[in-house]
Structure formats: C-alpha cells, structure tokens
C-alpha cells in the first residue's frame, strides 16, 4: 500500500516526478556504463499480479493456460533485449503489518459480497472495475516463473525491503512494482508496472530526487516524511493532529492541490524549515509529539534503512531499535526475535547479513550467485555434503548454489535433482534450515512458516457468505493442514492437553479476523509408521520415495486408495486425490459435479490456449464459481502437502494449467446440470470415454470405502425438500463442531478468534 496519499500526490500534483522511459534504451546505457554486467530488474511480484492477469475471464477460478502464456510473453519481452529479471514474493506477513493485512481482507470480503450479488442478479461476470484476482494466483505464479527458467525468491519478511536491498546491493537497473515505499527507500530507480507497455517496453520512472526537489527535502528525510504521513507500520491517525498543526501554519497553500496534497506539502515544509534547524542538537522525540508511540515511530523509520544505511535523524541508536540491521524471526521459537549479524562484503564494501548457528555460534555466509553475488539466506551443517536436500522437484532444473563445508568452493553449483548421501543425526535446527532453503528459493509453500513461527495465513476466496450449502475452503482443508502440522511439529498425540498450536489467519465468511484460530495438530496413520523429516527430506534410500508418497496420501486420509491412485496417469493422479478428498468431506457435492470436474480435466488436455480463450459461456452460475475456487484452493493445499512430504510428486502434476481451466469447468458444470450425456460432456471424443469411466470409478470406489455414496442431483431433490444439500451437519461430513446451535451450518461461524481446535472436528467420522 505504501505511503498514505503519496501515489495520488505524485500523479496529480507533481507530474514532473514521472518520466517516460524505455527499458531497452536504459539497458543499453547500463551496459555502456558497466561492461560485462547484465542489466537486471528486480520485480516485486505481489504488486504485479493483477497486471499480469490479463485473461478476460477471472470469475470462474482462473484461466491458467492463458495466464501462463501471458507470463511467458512478459518474460520474453525483457529477455529478448538482454534484461534479466529477478522476482520476489512475500514470504510472510510481519507482525507489525498484521492489522493492515486484516483491514484489507475485510475490505475484500465486502467486495466479494458485491460480486456474488451481481452474479446472482445479472448471471454474468462483473466488469473489470470489480476484478478480483483468482485464488492461488501468487503461489502458482511462483511455480510458473520457475518453470519459465526465471530466478524466483520468497522473502523472509515482506518483500519490499528485500527488493529494495537487492536492487541497491547489486547495482540493478531498477525495481518494477506499484508501491510508493519504493520512492522512500534510497535504492535503485523505481518503475511503474501499471504504466508498462509490453510491446514498446516503455513505462513511467518515478524519481525520488525530483520528489525531494519539489518538497524541499533530502533523500534521507523521506523515511521521516513517510512515517509522519502514515504507512503500513504507522497508523494514519497517529500523527493526524500533528499534520493539521503543520497545515494550519503552512502559508503556501495550493488551491488545486487538494487537502491531501497540501498536507504533504505542509509536513514537508515543517521538516525542511523547523526540524532541520534543530537536527543534530535535539533528539527527534523532543521535536515531535511521539509520546508512547516512540518505539513504533523509530521502527517505522528504521524499516526504510537498507544494509549499510543510517538515518541523520537518529542521534544515537534508540534502545531496542535496530537501524542498520534487519530483524528476522529465524528461530523455531515463535516468541524469539533473532538478530541477523552483519559482515562487510570485500567487493562492494557494503554490509551483508549472515546467519549464525545458535548452537555452534559459527557465522556462515549466505549463498552467493556466481554472476550476481546474490545473497539468498542459505545454510547447511558442515557435515552435510550436499548442495540440495533430497526430493527437490527436478522439473525446473535451476542451479541454486549453497554454502556447505568451508572447503567447498562457493562457485560450485548443482541442479535441483541432486545426489544426496544418507545423513544421520540431523538436528532440528538443521531440518529448519532445509525448510528455509526451500522457502527462500520459492520451492515450498507455508512449510517454513509453520516450523519457524507456527503462524500462517490465507487470503480471500470467492465464497458466497449467503450460500450455506457449501462449506468454506478454510474448514474443508483444515484436517489436511492439521496432519501436516503433526508431521512438521512432531511430538503430538490426539487428546493431549498441551502441545504445539498453529495460528491460522484464514479468511472465511463470518470471521472478523480479530484473532487467529488456534489449531492443534492431528495425528495421522502412515503405513509402516510416520517417517521423520530427515527421511522425507534428506534420505536417498530406495524406500524413501515410497514413504514420501505414503505420507502424502495419509495427509489426505487416502492410504487405503494408494493402489488405485498409483494406476492413474499423470497429471490426473493429483486430480483424483483431490476429488476423492472433496467428495468424502462435502456431502452436498453430487454426481453432476464429479462429471464436470473429470470432463473438464480430460477436455483440457486437447485444448489450445486460443481455444480456451475463445470459449463462451451461456451464463455464470454462482455455485460453479465457488466450486472453481474451492478446487484451486485444493491445489494450493496439495502444494503444501507435497512440500512437507519431501516432494513425492513433481509440481507439474498439480499445476492448474495442467488440470484446471475456470471457463471450461464452468461450461461442463452448466452442461452437466442440464443433464448432458457423458459423450456430450466429452465433446464426442470416444477416446476419452474409457479414461472418464476409469477416473470416475477410482473416485467412487474410494468414497464408498468411507461410506460416501455419490448420487445425482435428482436423488437429492427426491429425498429432501427446500434447497438441496442444506441438511445440517450432513452437508459437511466432518462430525461434531462448535457451530452455533440451530443454524444447521456447522462450517459457518466456527468461532473465529482464539478458539482452540484440538481434534479433527470437521472430520466426517
């Protein structure tokens, strides 16, 4: 979100700050100034998602083939002119920004309510002005970019700091994003993704030096200005009275600048004419009404200081505030805050972070990319003689070097499917480091967050809060997450009064997000016993891969269907796994739904991107919209489980562009609802009929093992009155819950906040 009011101020009040630039010309000038250095742009991927998603349809669950094609075109446009791209994704939400995260999620809830109201009244997709990015877009964009051979990293904090730091330390061409914080950081140039024309490679560069010139400030004053105006750390109301005092004494009001513009000018004028007079003589808290907010204010200013930078507004480093070192929570203890020590890079003369093993006290330098000298926060125990942990998905075949023993040269690299020696006696801290490696390299999903802080979040999903027939995805997939918690955190037995608790900030209808849900692990049964993380992640024994698969199936409670699932070809194996789980958990899913899911997956194999793009729908059905998003959230859950289990499946098996297309599913859903024959659903392709029947048989047989018989919608209509599927706890086959009595929807109003979920309360038995 950046600095309050600054985006509008720059766009309307100070247009001279914005300059049209051409990336190809900038790259040529960069090569002239730095011979032998590849022009590199650091991309804040989270800022770019809505601009990358160009498919016309967004309501049905995502047009993933079209989206993948759009990403490929984006990458090609830059690489064709010799520009290298480095993509950063947010890895976690910082505690200081949780309130802002919640505020945005609640705002999204209101937008989603309006979307469903529009769908049910108009039976069509709303216009782009109501656009809402498809579920899972961020996580699958990571995998898509890695598939396209791009360097993709996941941050250990919110990404903007790491983006700005990387751009500065590696002399990058600039930062591509949409966040006014990049005007505040003293780093490389900032370019707007929203103004980018991909055909010409032209966009707008926002110049912080020109901004300072307009405001009468120095670049070093910008962090102070940002905090006084309000940002993601400093609430807007904290300095509201101070800003109005500045405005009342400001004598150069501009009528055409508006109230917000004049406030920015007035605060800047106060900094330049009043605060500068006493700078170096008085502490900042003596010049500003900080009061009890002093610590938060210092934290806000310090959050903009990159490695090696100091603020002229700090006479001395305030107690308890780190101004030159970034604080990261690296310990597995969620309460601890471990400081990352700094060392000096002999080439750049800049301070760079290193990771200190808390047991050995040995400082280990971070992984360095041979070309860009990129620090990627990687550590392995000196006794572990491998460059990558076992089970790493080999699909991307990217080289990501890591430091190991001091005798191993830094420039040595290894592909992502390494030869791993069996390691014995691996400590918990070393296992955590393996998780961190996968996290930073954007290979895993949520695993490191669970292990390091025991806190995860999931943003909004297109779910209709007024439709009680379908449970929220947050509850449907919670039992899977609980089993993953048991696997990752260990030492937990069902029924124990104490044990690890994971804080879940999951958005679902009725959750005010005032507190996280406190969720306990759920013990699972793996044939032969649950293997250790050392075995799952590091072992190269022949039996290890089978153990990884057994553990994955156990997380879905599908161990009894292992043989049937193994017989299914890729990429339909993951599809079957997910469908079995969904139909066992949710009673309101019917045979027509199953037909639609299977038919779209088979037909997708024979469709080109252009065919999918030109697909037209008769109308939009709100239930089908929910089912599409529910399925995609299941694919993200598969990404979590696959990561936790040591990658028994390659990621291509559950990437949405291989198994799901929103419009195609919607078409099959509407056809199935109308009673189309299977042959018609399969577009008269008789070669798919056998596959269809085999997949249907696998799902139905597995469901029958759990006493779940999948019936058609006519069966529901003949047995139940009123809205089909709304039959109290039978709708969601997860047993007893804490739902409010008399409501008949145990998955709604599940007691958001700090209620502890000790058992698998949503399990059907």
Image (tube, grey):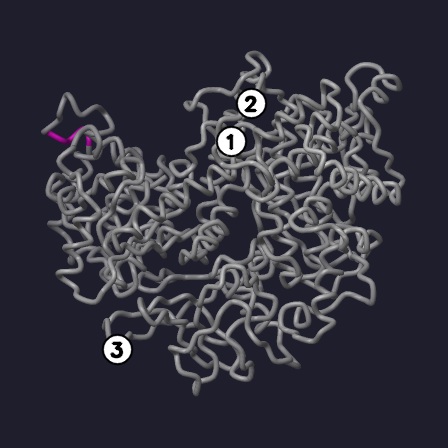
Q: Main secondary structure of the magenta part?
A: helix
Residue at image mark 1: 611
Residue 556: x and y in percent read 75, 50
Q: Residue at x 56, y 17 (%)?
A: 117
Q: Residue at x 83, y 45 (%)?
A: 702
Residue at image mark 2: 113
The numbered disc on residue 346 is 3
Cα–Cα span, label 1 and label 3:
55 Å
Judged from the image, the secondary structure of the residue bearing numbered disc 1 is: helix
Left or right for 558, reference 292: right
Locate residue 235: give its quadrant.
Answer: top left
- How busy is the neighbourhood of tag 3: few (under 14 within 10 Å), some, or many (20 plus)? few
- Foreground pick, 113 / 235: 113
Which quadrant, please, contains the N terminus? top left
Q: Residue furthest top?
A: 121
Cα–Cα span, label 2 and label 3:
55 Å
Q: Earlier in the sequence, mark 2 or mark 3?
A: 2
Contact (Cβ within 8 Å) of mark 2 with mark 3: no
- How busy is the neighbourhood of tag 1: few (under 14 within 10 Å), some, or many (20 plus)? few
In the image, residue 378 sits, relative to residue 742, either above or below, namely: below
In the image, residue 193 sits, relative to residue 284, either above or below, namely: above
Cα–Cα span, label 2 and label 1:
31 Å
Locate residue 55: give its quadrant.
Answer: top left
Circle nearer the viewer, 1 or 3: 1
The numbered disc on residue 600 is none
Q: Earlier in the sequence, mark 2 or mark 1?
A: 2
Q: How many marks?
A: 3
Residue 648: x and y in percent read 66, 61
Which quadrant, please, contains the C terminus? top right
Span of residues in magenta:
247-251
């Amino acid at each position: 979100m950046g600095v309050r009011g600054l985006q509008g101020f720059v766009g309307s009040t100070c247009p001279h700050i914005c300059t049209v630039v051409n990336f190809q010309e900038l790259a040529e000038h960069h090569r002239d100034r730095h011979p032998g250095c590849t022009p590199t742009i650091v991309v804040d991927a989270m800022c770019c998602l809505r601009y990358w998603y160009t498919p016309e349809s967004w309501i049905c669950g995502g047009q993933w083939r079209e989206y993948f094609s759009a990403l490929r075109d984006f990458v090609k446009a830059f690489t064709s002119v010799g520009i290298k791209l480095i993509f950063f994704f947010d890895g976690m939400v910082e505690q200081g920004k949780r309130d802002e995260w919640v505020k945005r999620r609640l705002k999204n809830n209101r937008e989603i309510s309006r979307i469903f109201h529009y769908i049910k009244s108009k039976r069509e997709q709303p216009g782009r002005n109501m656009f809402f990015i498809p579920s899972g877009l961020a996580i699958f964009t990571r995998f898509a970019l890695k598939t396209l051979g791009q360097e993709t990293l996941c941050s250990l904090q919110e990404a903007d700091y790491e983006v700005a730091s990387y751009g500065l330390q590696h002399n990058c061409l600039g930062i591509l994003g949409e966040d006014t914080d990049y005007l505040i950081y003293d780093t490389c140039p900032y370019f707007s993704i929203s103004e980018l024309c991909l055909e010409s490679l032209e966009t707008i560069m926002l110049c912080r030096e020109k901004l300072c010139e307009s405001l009468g400030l120095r670049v070093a004053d910008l962090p102070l200005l940002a905090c006084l105006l309000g940002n993601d750390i400093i609430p807007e109301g904290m300095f509201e009275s101070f800003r109005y005092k500045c405005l009342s004494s400001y004598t150069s009001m501009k009528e055409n600048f508006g109230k917000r513009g004049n406030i920015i000018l007035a605060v800047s004028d106060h900094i330049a004419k009043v605060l500068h007079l006493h700078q170096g003589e008085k502490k900042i808290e003596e010049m500003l009404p900080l009061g009890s907010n002093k610590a938060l204010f210092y934290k806000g200013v310090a959050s903009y200081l990159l490695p090696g930078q100091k603020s002229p507004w700090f006479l001395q480093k305030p107690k308890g505030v780190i101004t030159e070192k970034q604080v990261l929570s690296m310990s597995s203890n969620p309460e601890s805050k471990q400081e990352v020590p700094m060392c000096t890079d002999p080439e750049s003369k800049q301070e760079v972070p290193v990771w200190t093993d808390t047991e050995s006290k040995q400082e280990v330098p971070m992984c360095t990319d041979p070309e860009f000298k990129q620090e990627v926060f990687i550590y392995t125990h000196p006794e572990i003689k491998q460059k990558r942990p076992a089970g790493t998905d080999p699909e991307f075949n990217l080289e990501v070097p890591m430091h190991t023993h001091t005798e191993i040269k830094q420039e040595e690299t290894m592909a992502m499917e390494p030869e791993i020696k069996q390691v014995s006696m691996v400590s918990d801290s070393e296992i955590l480091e393996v998780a961190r490696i996968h996290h930073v390299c954007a290979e895993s999903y949520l695993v490191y967050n669970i292990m390091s802080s025991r806190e995860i979040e999931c943003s909004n999903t297109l779910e209709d809060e007024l439709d009680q027939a379908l449970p929220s995805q947050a509850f449907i997939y919670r039992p899977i997450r609980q089993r993953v918690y048991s696997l990752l955190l260990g030492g937990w037995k069902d029924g124990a009064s104490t044990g690890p608790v994971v804080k879940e900030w999951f958005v679902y209808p009725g959750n005010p997000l005032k507190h996280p849900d406190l969720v306990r692990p759920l013990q699972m049964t793996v044939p032969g016993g649950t293997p250790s993380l050392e075995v799952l992640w590091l072992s190269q024994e022949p039996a290890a891969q089978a153990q990884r698969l057994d553990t994955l199936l156990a997380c879905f409670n599908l161990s009894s269907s292992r043989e049937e699932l193994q017989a299914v070809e890729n990429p339909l194996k993951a599809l079957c796994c997910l469908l079995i789980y969904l139909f066992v958990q949710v009673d309101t899913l019917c045979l027509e739904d199953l037909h639609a899911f299977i038919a779209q997956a088979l037909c997708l194999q024979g469709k080109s991107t252009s065919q999918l793009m030109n697909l037209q729908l008769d109308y939009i059905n709100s239930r089908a919209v929910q089912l599409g998003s529910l399925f995609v959230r299941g694919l993200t859950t598969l990404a979590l489980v696959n990561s936790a289990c040591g990658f028994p499946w390659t990621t291509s098996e559950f990437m949405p562009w291989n198994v799901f297309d929103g419009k195609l599913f919607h078409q099959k859903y509407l056809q199935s609802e109308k009673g189309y024959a299977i042959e018609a659903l399969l577009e008269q392709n008789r070669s798919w009929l056998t596959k269809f029947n085999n997949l249907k048989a696998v799902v139905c047989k597995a469901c029958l093992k759990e006493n779940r018989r999948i019936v058609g919608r006519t069966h529901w209509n003949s047995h139940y009155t009123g809205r089909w599927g709304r039959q109290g706890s039978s709708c969601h086959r997860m047993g007893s819950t804490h739902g409010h009595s008399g409501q008949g929807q145990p998955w709604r109003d599940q007691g958001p906040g700090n209620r502890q979920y000790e058992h698998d309360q949503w399990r059907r038995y």
